[in-house]
Amino acid sequence: MKIKEIIDLYIKKIPKDDIYLLISSFLNCKKLDIIKYYDLDIDYSKIEKLFKRYENKEPINYILKSKEFYGLNFYVDERVLIPRFETEILVEKVINKLQKIDNKKLNLLDLCCGSGNIGLTLKYNLEELNVDLVDISNEALEVAKINMNNLNLRVNIINSDLFKKLNKKYDVIVCNPPYLAEDEASYQTDKYEPHLALYTKDGIEIFERIFKNISNYLNPNFLIFLEIGDGHYKKIEKVINKYLKNIKINLYYDYNDRERIVIIESL
């Protein structure tokens, strides 16, 4: 079957952009170059498998094994959460803040790192940072290592349940933990994405565990950046103030006016 015929077959069922992404992945070419292959005959049964996965609501980034994040291409598969666009706000906040200070030799921890998209993006943009990626999931860390190598970066990758295996102090801690309550599952995330990376008992429990011990891993002058769930801020603020003193806390909203980023700064 010709490529053009395959496009025509799916054009009324699937967004055109996704059709082109699936075909470009199959042909290993750029999306813009597909027009050159319109008359190419291929074995339809092979590419049909990709479209069936898509029609079964498997996230397209798992099918393509890639996700663009903050201008970089990250490898992703079912072992990790697919990086979200909203998390770019977190990265932007960190970069803007650290560019205003001397970030040379700063120790930065990406806690609950998943694919490594946050910590690796920060290392890519702020080369002087000493970055540690930490996650409880060995499978997620395997993906983070792939991304580290693909981006030609060098960071420390550590398997640990939060701080348990850490023995140093940090100037900056960045954390996008599992913050969805168990009753917030959707079909697509529930079926395909790793529950460990998404859900915590009530959306707050993980923050209690983090802040109970965080002071042991902070230098005197510190910054903490968190991504949180909408509607969770007031409860998380109470947890933060329970364990940290002499701090300034700021809340920032995402593009849909939802609570999203918390920045904690030592005074």
Image: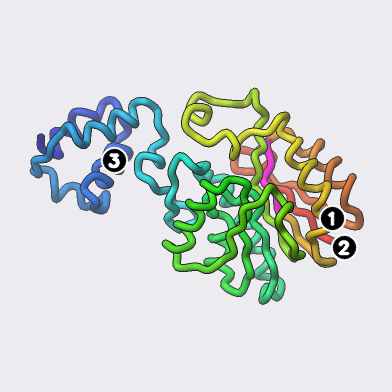
What's the residue at 67%, 43% (across, down)? 260
Q: Amino acid at mark 2?
A: Leu
Give the mark nearest the N terminus, 2 or 1: 1
List the residue tagged with mark 3: 22
Q: Position of residue 60 (x, y in %)?
A: 38, 38
Q: Position of residue 78 (x, y in %)?
A: 46, 39
Magenta residues: mostly which secondary structure? strand
CA gap, disc 2 to disc 1? 7 Å
In-front residue for pair 107/7 = 107
Position of residue 227 relative to residue 92, above or below, is above
Which residues make up the magenta segment?
225-229
Confirm whether the magenta stretch covers residue 227. yes
Q: Secondary structure at mark 2?
A: loop
> Is 211 placed left or right of 7 in the picture?
right
* Colour style of the rendered protein structure: rainbow
Give the mark nearest the N terminus, 3 or 2: 3
Q: Which mark is residue 248?
A: 1
Q: Secondary structure at mark 1?
A: strand
Give the mark nearest the N terminus, 1 or 3: 3
Q: Which mark is residue 267?
A: 2
Are dots 2 and 1 in contact, CB under 8 Å? yes
How packed mark 3 is, by other alpha carbons closer than 10 Å (few <14, some 14-19, many 20 or more), is many
